[in-house]
Amino acid sequence: VFWKDSPGSSLILKQTEYFQPTAQLVALVEASTAHEVVVVTGEAGVGKSTLAAALVRPEITGGGVPPGFAHAVAFLEVTPSLYTLADDLYRQLPRSLPGFAQAEAEFHRSVPRDQREQLDPLVKLILLPLGYLPGEPVVRIVLDGLDRIQTGMRGEVCDALAARPRNVRLVVMARDDT
C-alpha cells in the first residue's frame, strides 16, 4: 500500500472503517477521469475526507475506484509545511508509480543543480520530476483539507500545483469558504 507510511495513514483507515460505496464516489472518479482538476467542496462533516480516503483504497469500493486510480494522497491537516507535504508525496510515488525513480533521475540530469536548488520542495521533489515520466502517463494526486492549512502555505501550494505537468491530475477537497 503506497500510503502506509504517510502521516495521513491513520486518517485513511479511520475514514474508511465503515465505508459503503456511494454514487458520489463514482461521480468523483468519472469527473477526475474527464478533468485535470476536480475540487470537492462542502461543509465540515459531509464526507469529503471519506471520499479522499476511498480514492486510495479501491479494494473497499466495490469496483467504484479502479486499482491504481490514485498515486499519492495527502491529508493537509497533518502536513503542516510545504516541505512535509512534498516529503509525504515523495515517499508514496516510488511505491505507486513505476518509473518515478527514473523520471527523478532524468530531471536531475536535465536541470542544473543551481536551478533545482531555487525551486520550492513540491516543485523540485514532485511536480517537475513527474513531467519526465516516459509516455506522460496520468498521475493522480489527492489532497484533502486545503482549507486546513495556513493562508500563506495555501497560496504556495496552489501556485506550485498550477505549474504542474499536464499529465498530473488533482482531486482537491476543501470547505466551501476556502
Image (tube, helix red, strand yellow):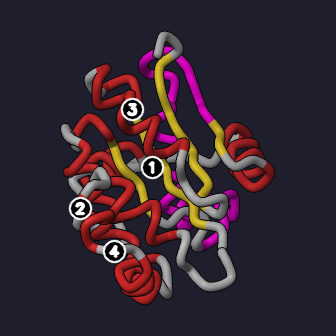
- Name the residue located 68 percent from the left edge and 82 percent from the top edge: 135
- Mark 2 vs 4, N-terminal side: 4
Q: Which mark is residue 112?
A: 4
Q: How many angstroms separate mark 1 from mark 4 (CA)?
A: 37 Å
Q: Where is mark 2, residue-wise?
A: 117
Range of residues picked out in magenta = 39-67
> Nearer the N terminus, badge 1 or badge 4?
1
**Which numbered disc, 1 or 2, marks the residue that appears first in the sequence?**
1
Give the mark toward the camera: 1 or 2.
2
User: Which tag is nearer the camera, tag 1 or tag 3?
Assistant: 3
Which of marks 2 and 3 precedes in the sequence?
2
Q: Closer to the camera: disc 1 or disc 4?
A: 4
Q: Residue 90: horizontal and vertical position, in percent?
A: 31, 67
Camera-side residue: 64 or 79? 79
Helix, strand or loop status at disc 3: loop
- What kind of residue is marked 4? Pro
* SS under mark 1: helix
Tag 1 residue: 53
Q: Quadrant of residue 64?
A: bottom right
- Which comes before the other along the chain, label 3 or label 4? 4
Query: How would you rate the neighbour count of disc 1 (Cα within 10 Å): few for under 14, some for 14-19, many for 20 or more?
Result: many
- Residue at 42% from the left image edge and 49% from the top image edge: 16
Q: Earlier in the sequence, mark 1 or mark 3?
A: 1
Relative placement, left or right, of 82 versus 26 is left
Q: Is residue 56 magenta?
A: yes
